[in-house]
Image (spheres, rainbow, N blue to C red):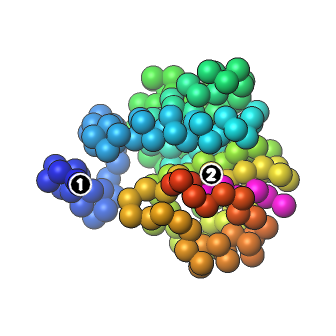
Amino acid sequence: MLTEDQLREMRFYATANDYSDAERYERFALSLKLDERGREIGDVVASLAPARILECASATGLTAAGVKERLAAAGISATYHSLDIEDALLRFASARSRGDCFAQGSFEHVPFSGDFDVYIMMGAMGYRSSPDAFYAEVARVLKPGGHFVWPLIGMETRASDEEREAMARNGLTVVRDAGGFVVCRRQ
């Protein structure tokens, strides 16, 4: 159950779309235990043994911190690229060494090409212009055989039929849709 403060912050971000106060966003994310979710994501990513990871809509880097922690525990060395449209969030993450490389930009026009083993995105799916355009971009930046990791949040428990169809149309095969995660492999 969300607290009144959490609901107020959710409404703020949903209506103002203002993520410029990184300290405020970090407090909100921690209240939602997104640091714990980052470690759960890390367990999923570690099972894929990646060398290059891209996280889009990376915010303050809580996911990066959790993933890197779990990879280190598994003895996996990977380069973690963080992409976010909000420069203040990237500076916050960089100052805390939550990731290795930081780039400002949109997940709809990722400034990298197809050389990532894993692409992670959590919490920004509602900002996509269309599922097909999004999954085409995911497929473009992943290596063949690379994986898209979508940690589900909120009330979602599985990918909808429409999401699964858009993934398939864009060369992504669902290999996991359970336990709060959707994982797809690029063909």
Which residue is located at x 76 percent, y 43 percent?
A: 117
Lateral position of residue 9 relative to residue 130, left or right: left
Lateral position of residue 45 relative to residue 32, left or right: right
Residue denoted by label 1: 1
Identity of the residue furthest to the front in this view? 179
- For the residues labelled 1 and 2, the Cα–Cα distance comes to 25 Å
> Which numbered mark, 1 or 2, is in the foreground of this view?
1
Across and down, in percent, residue 96 comes to 45, 23
Across and down, in percent, residue 105 comes to 56, 50
Going by the numbered disc 2, the residue's amino acid type is Val
Lateral position of residue 6 relative to residue 37, left or right: left
Lateral position of residue 27 relative to residue 122, left or right: left
Going by the numbered disc 1, the residue's amino acid type is Met
Q: Residues within 10 Å of mark 1 (few under 14, many from 20)?
A: few
The correct choice, above or below, for 148 with respect to 127 in the image is above
Q: Residues within 10 Å of mark 2 (few under 14, many from 20)?
A: many
Q: Is residue 186 magenta?
A: yes
The correct choice, above or below, for 142 with respect to 81 in the image is below
The correct choice, above or below, for 56 with respect to 71 in the image is below
**Residue 164 in which image quadrant:** bottom right
Identity of the residue furthest to the left in this view? 4
The correct choice, above or below, for 39 with respect to 178 in the image is above
Which residue is located at x 72 percent, y 51 percent?
A: 147
Q: State the SS at label 2.
A: strand
Magenta residues, as a range?
A: 182-187
Q: State the SS at label 1.
A: loop
Across and down, in percent, residue 162 comes to 59, 79
The reply to whether callout 1 and callout 2 are in contact (CB within 8 Å) is no
Quadrant placement of the C terminus: bottom right
Residue denoted by label 2: 149
**Residue 67 in which image quadrant:** top right
